[in-house]
Amino acid sequence: MAEGGLEERSLEILDIPDDLDEDLLCLYFENTRRSGGGDVVSFEKHGNHALVVFEDAETAARVVSKSHALQNTKLTVRRKPPKDPGKLLLKGLNPQTSLDHVELYVENVTGMYCETDFILYQSPNKDLVLVHLKKPLDKDFQTLKDEFSKKPLNGANLTLEQVESTDSILVANLSLALTEDMLELYFESSRAGGADVLAVSMLADGRAKVSFKDVKSVDDVLQKSHHYEGTDLVVEPYFDFLHALEDQSSVSGQDEQGTSTDENQPQPVSPQSLTVSVPAKECVSFVSVLDATKHHLLSLSSLLENLKKDHPKFDVSLAKDGVQIKGPDQVEVERRKNEVLKFLTGVVEDRLTYDKLKAEFLGREDVKKRLNLSLKIVPSTYSVSDCTVSVTSPSHSAVKQARDLIESQISEFTVPIAKECESMLSSTEWSDFLASLDFCIAKLSNAAPHARETVLSMEPGMLKFLQLHHQDLLADMGEVILFPLETGDGLSIQGEWSVCQSAAELLSAIIGSIFTKTIVVTQPGISRFLLEEEGVSILAEMTAKFEVYIDMAKVHWEPLEDDDILELAWKMTTCQNFQRSSSADSIQQFTAGVPNGRNSTDARTSARIEEAKKILAVIGSDLNPQPSSLGVTDIESLDLYSDRSQDTSAATEEEADQPQSLQAHDLQSTSAPMDVCSLDEDASFLLAIQMSMELNQRSDAEDFQKALELSRRESMPNEENTQLERAFEMSLQDTITTANKAEICVFANYNHDLVRVDIALGKKVGLRQCEEKVENKNLRKLSSHQKRCIELIKRKHAVEISIQGTTAVLSGFKEYVSEAVMDLKNVLRRTENMMSDAEIVKTVQWVWVEQGSSSKAIPYSPDATVFIENAWKMKQKKIDILFNNQPYSIDFEKMEEHSLASGKSVSIKRKMLSTEDLYTEGEDEDYSLLSSIPEVCPVDVDSDEFQNVVKDFYDTLQDNHNKIRIIKVEKLMNKLLHDQYRLKKVSIEQSSSESQVQRTLYHGTSETSVKEICIHGFNRSFCGKNATVYGQGVYFAVNASLSVSDTYSPPNADGHKFIFVARVLTGDFTVGKYDYKTAPLKESSGIPVRYHSVTDQIGSPTLFVIFNDTQAYPEYLITCKKIYG
């Protein structure tokens, strides 16, 4: 009886000589003394290898441990290769099925992804595919085999088989100078794996088969990257069913033009034998060249002469049917042969299509003889068949050079013939003339047909798709002329009317068969990614792979050139108008959140413009220089900058004080038709005139120019500075949104190609997305300037930034996020001393000192103080500002305020008020993550509700009782979540066997998840990230001591931790497991009923896990902090 498994008792014998008798070999392995063998169960010989199965495993082990030789021939004996768990063979494929189709099929059946989990190798007949797994299978092989057999592919029923481990690899991209012994030495070296090489076989096309003694060596070699003499070697596993036919075709190809030797000469031998014996006779090799064109190219080239010149001991001659190489060394002869083969395999043929007249001209013997003389220097040759000219050269560059040379030698011209000479065209003299032409050909053109132009309109992307993937069809339309329209949205078809009509109908039918799809990808930074190098490369790859055209016309992204975010944010802050002095209630209004709105400023500006228009209308109504009641002093006395729209009583008094003539002129001006644009321009000039009159005592041209510029800014709110600021503010958010959304239009011949593009693009984009967090306590109280900086970071780097309390979450493409994180940290570092607007008003006061004996310090208004303080913190040397509609400048180096209108300067000072409020502990209590959520309210510290929540919390803190300080307790009143919870409670109470279905439990979370939980409840998409030991659900702790751990409630930048007090429906529960995605079924139940939750232990549970989001309701949020020391 056989002992041991079949694999343990089976051995392989390799390198068996053809003349070795099979019976003799079997007797040898049955002889215990000679081979160490014994009783043989079976013996099968196939070619130069055999499989022998012994009676017991011990005999097989004894045989494999010895070395064997028979009839002076060394035999290689090894164990039969085991099944390879990393490779599967898919059989029965329809040869018409593409490899991409097989790839999608394997992904669907196995749930794996080709890019990360497996590689496919297709057999030459395309009926077999080897699946090379990059990681072990999750499923049992038999189960997977059944799944493949149940699901046909392209009408074929497939079978899945396991494959025996191979002992060979296929090495490609070899240089011609590389020999078999060099390959053997390389793969036996330590850098290539250090394996024992059994044999090396050189194949065609720069490839070789390398076999190893141990099949385990193959995986070791495949895991490494291989480089030899500056060349990257391509290595893959070798299987007979994948490469046998390919090798045979290579061998047969070599037989046609390959090697034949003289009968008296030794045949090519292996490198091992070459190193042992030296040929005694001259070695001869012959390369058969049966192709007349290649034979002619060899005669034209200098290859053979160079080989003779470089190797004088070798004779290289061109025979009638090939190349003969003679020399003293067989290895060197083979190398010369490889150089000849390299030349022959590199021959390139290019085909040109001409009209019948040109093709006939090029086919004439006299023309061919002359052109071949010119082509000899390339070297190249050509042949003509019908209207096709085939150009053959040794390389791509040579064939292009030859093609250009032929094109340059042909010229075409038309000679008009007068009507009186047309009768000569039918004479014999004309025919004799045509026959006598040397290197020229002529043909009478037919009567010109009725030509027309047809315009075929289409989308620009459709036109690009036709040009890209239907270029052969367009090229075949030789009877018409096709021109793309300058607008890019159609084709102009020119030619004979009937031909144009047919071409238009054909193209319309093709356009109608083309499928289109608009794919919208929404990811942070997607537009930037697709327009930059990596994205363009991915789209080009998909364009070629799926034969589609991807139109990017609606994808927009422009880089932000300014590198300094802080400087750019400040540039966006235009010159603003403020009250100069602080009124009694201005601080109270500012801190209460009443802004100095821009609308009021615009209203004041409009009033000033209207006033200026009235004055200009008065001036314009009387062009004669006669005395008027409105003189220069009247104009100077008018306050063109006063806010007439807000102070109606003052306006009424001023109108009452005006002369009667001015009022009359006002009435006339309202009815008279005037040029509004000229009034606007004149009004702006009038403002500058007033300032220039105030400066009549000064000669400073620079101040005058600045007064003119600032007055124009203020008097024309729709001019450049206001328009730019508003346009930038409005477009900034649009630009950010555009960067995060890409709308691309895809054109394809088949609908499934559109789906494949959509899936492939989604995968490639998703793999490159990442998320990073930045914690900083200043994030929760950002000033308007800092907020603008963050918006500019989003714009500059095309990332999304969301701020939750003291944490900023940056998401997008990894490279962009890394850049944005550095910019955000830099902005926070440089503005760490900045305060919010309200804090500035509370703690800082800027004053100007009134000139005179009293030298009284007058504080600026709150909004002006905020603007000046931010400019000072930004280290601006000088700023321009408008006070009470008058232009001023503030010099921080001199600490002076300068009026551009009057030319006067006063000193300014910066004072610090009490900073007591900035450092009180009350800030912790005042700040809340949930301040924007109306369904949340703080719990009064003195209430019984607060005391009960805090008591229960501290009672379960255990060892952490004295280490945690509660900052605040907030109560949630989300009606939707509460109603869902109540409905779920009724359901569980009806199905539960437990008397207590509800428990008060604790759930610690991060700062970024607090709002999500308050709004959406305990959703598993952002809960359960820290633990999955008992299932993939939401975890709740019985004791708060577990929830306050940093693992479950990580502190934010302020050290705050966030713990939810939740009502949880635990119902019936059991012990959980890590792979549970839902609660398990009850085993004792006759019908399929699940538990409601799982826990860590039944007797005294410390935590619970739920798998239904409505089973828990967040009732309170406790914000606390660890106490150190």
Image (spheres, grey):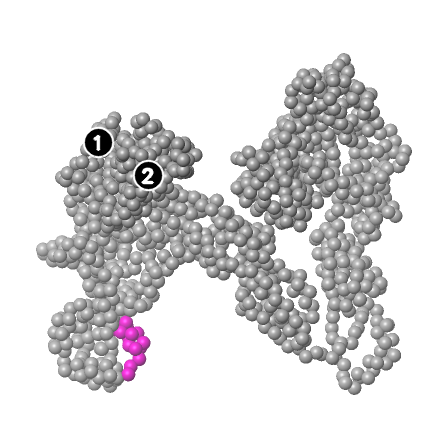
Pick whichever, 682 or 543, lies toward us: 543
Q: Quadrant of residue 543?
A: bottom right
Judge from the rendering whether residue 107 lies leftward or rightward of residue 68; answer left or right. left
The part of the chain drawn in magenta is 673-686
Task: Judge whether residue 682 is colored magenta.
Answer: yes
- Identify residue for label 2: 991
The residue at 78%/26% (across/down) is 16
Q: Residues within 10 Å of mark 1 (few under 14, many from 20)?
A: some
Compared to residue 615, the image places residue 781 above or below, namely above
Say what secondary structure mark 2 lies in. Answer: helix
Judge from the rendering whether residue 58 lies leftward or rightward of residue 785; answer left or right. right
Which residue ends up furthest to the top in the rendered image? 33
- Identify residue for label 1: 954
Viewport quadrant of the N terminus: top right
Q: Quadrant of residue 146?
A: top right
Pick whichever, 1007 or 124, lies toward us: 124
In whole angstroms, how far apart are the C-alphas of marks 1 and 2? 34 Å
Task: Judge whether residue 354 is colored magenta.
Answer: no
Compared to residue 386, the image places residue 32 above or below, namely above
Three-letter amino acid code at the position of disc 2? Ser
Q: Is tag 1's residue or tag 2's residue first in the polypeptide sequence? A: 1
Say what secondary structure mark 1 lies in. Answer: helix
